[in-house]
Image: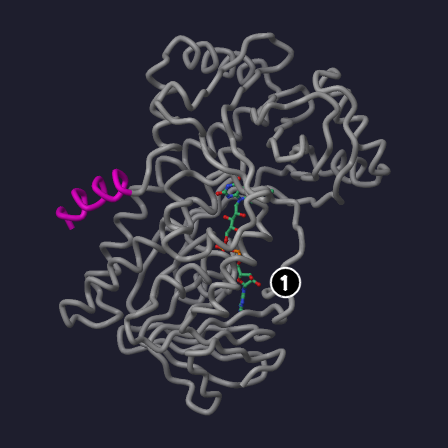
Amino acid sequence: MNNDKYQTSATGRCDDKDGACDVLIIGAGPVGLSLSLSLRGLGLDVRLIERQPLKAIATPQFDGREIALSHRSVDILQNLGAWKRIAPDEISPLKSAKVTNGGSQARLHFDARAVGADKLGFLVSNHNIRRALYDEHLECGEACLITGAEATPVKTSGNGSSVTLADGRMFCARLLVAADTRFSTARRAAGISASQHDFGKTMIVSRMKFEHPHNHVAWECFLPGGALAILPLNANEASIVQTFAPEEAARQMALGLDDYAAAAGKRLKGRFGALHPASERCAYPLVSVYANRFAASGFALVGDAAVGMHPVTAHGFNLGVQGQDILARQLRRALGCNRGIADAGALKAYERAHQKLSRPLYWSTLALAELYARETPVARLARRAIFDVGRALPPARKLIMKNLTQPLASAEMARQTSFENY
Ligand SMILES: Cc1cc2nc3c(=O)[nH]c(=O)nc-3n(C[C@H](O)[C@H](O)[C@H](O)COP(=O)(O)OP(=O)(O)OC[C@H]3O[C@@H](n4cnc5c(N)ncnc54)[C@H](O)[C@@H]3O)c2cc1C
C-alpha cells in the first residue's frame, strides 16, 4: 500500500485490516522516526501514526530551527544511518560560543579546545534532520508509516493500548509510545500530568547573511528588550534568534525582511557589518513542559512529549534523540531476556535514566530563561553575579563543554554504570 495516507517501507508491513501490532508510535517527528529506526532488527511489527500528510514528512519544509547537535546526538544519528544522508555543506561546525550580558563588554567564552575537542558541536537545520531520518526509514526502515491520520488514544494498560484515528479505524499495540509534541494528547489520555511553563514570550528565527565573518562562533546576547542569539552557519550565514514579548514580536513580524535584518544588525551594534535576509521568519511561542512520568503500563513518552525544553540551551532534540536511544536499548534488553516488549522493568529503567539525564538540564534551563527574561533590578543583579561566577570558575565552563563534546562511547559507559542500580 503506498498512497498519500499509507506508506510502508520495502520490508515493512502495513495491514490496514489488522490493527494489532507490537509497538505503536504516535508522531513521526524527528524523535518518533528515530525510535522506529532504533527498533529495527527485533522482528517487531512497529507502526507510526502521523497527522500530517505524507508530503510534509517526506519533504519537510524549512521551519527556521537550526538544531545545535551535541557529539553524542551525532553518534546516535550515525548509528541510525541518518547522518550520512545529510549533505556535508548542510552541516555547520560550531567552534566556540560566547555569552554577553546587557551592554557590558564582559563575555563568557566556551571554547571546545579547552577540553581537547575541535568543535563544540554541529548545526543542522531541523528539516534536514527530519528528511534524513525519513529517507533512512523509506530505504531501510521496517516500520509502517500511516500519515494524514490524527490519533486519539483511548486506553493504555499492561495488556495493550488502543488508539482510534479520526476516520474511525482502531489500532491496538502491546506498547504505545507518544512522540506527539510537547502538547501531547496521548500523555493527557494516559493520565500523566506535566509541569508546564509559559514564558509569555515569542521567539523569532530566520537566516541572515553577514557582511563580516562570524568564524563559526555562536553568540548569546542578553540585551535589554530581549535575548538575541547568533547560530553560525556555512557560507557566512547565521540563524538570528530573537525573543520578544508577544506585542513586540507581532510588530517585528510585520516589518519587511530587509528592515527586520537592519534592526537586528543595529541591536548587534554593527559588530558583523550589514545583515541581509536569507530566509523567511518563523515565530514560536515559548512554552516548556516536563512530564511528571515518562512511562506507565504499556505506555512511554519520548521527545518533546516527555521533555519540551526552552530552546536557549539547545537541548530539546538532543535530549529527545538520546531518550529514544535509552528506551530502545532497554526494550532490546527486555526482549533478549524474553520479558516482552512492554516489560514494566524496562519502561521503569527508561524512565529513571531519562529523568536523570533531563531533569537537571530542564530545571536549570527554565531558571536561566526566566532570569534572563526579567528586567527587575534583582534579576539584573543576579545575572551579573552568575556571569561573574561563570567567568571566575573555569571548571564550570569545562563541565558544560565536556557535556557538549562527550562522545557516545564515554556517555554510554556512564549510562551502563548507572543502569546497574535499577
Ligand atoms: C526555535 C527552536 C529552536 C530549537 N533549537 C534546538 C537546538 O538547537 N537543539 C536541540 O536539541 N533542540 C532544539 N529545538 C527543539 C527541537 O526542535 C524539538 O525538541 C524536536 O523537534 C522535538 O521532536 P519530537 O519528534 O519530539 O516532536 P515534534 O517535532 O513536535 O514532532 C511531533 C510529531 O507528532 C505529530 N502529532 C502530534 N499529535 C499527533 C496526533 N494526535 N496524531 C498523530 N500525529 C501527531 C506532529 O504532527 C509532529 O509531526 C528547538 C526548537 C525550537 C522551536
Callout 1: 10 Å neighbours few (<14), some, many (20+)? Answer: some
Who is closer to the viewer here, 370 or 260? 260
Closer-to-camera residue (77/361): 77
Q: In the rendering, at what x and y percent does residue 133 appear?
A: 49, 59
As drawn, 364 above or below 34:
above
Q: Quadrant of residue 244?
A: top right
From the viewer's perspective, is 380 left or right of 46?
right
Q: Residue at x 40, y 64 (%)?
A: 37
Q: In terms of image quadrants, where is residue 337?
A: bottom left
Q: Residue at x 44, y 53 (%)?
A: 303
Q: Which stretch appears magenta?
A: 409-422
Name which residue lies at 40% across and 20% down: 113
User: Could you tell whether 338 is left or right of 254 in the image?
Assistant: left
Q: Which residue is mark 1?
A: 59
Q: Is residue 181 magenta?
A: no
As drawn, 227 above or below 250: above
Count of picture labels = 1
Q: Is-magenta flag for residue 411?
A: yes
- Measured as percent of width and height from the top left, residue 152 is found at 50, 73
In this rendering, the answer to whether 43 lies above or below 67 is: below
Residue at disc 1, secondary structure: loop
Comparing 62 with 304, the one in front is: 62
Residue 85: give x, y in percent of width and height: 51, 55
Q: Amino acid at mark 1?
A: Thr
Say if 219 sits above or below 346 in the image.
above
Left or right: 266 as drawn, with respect to 45 = right
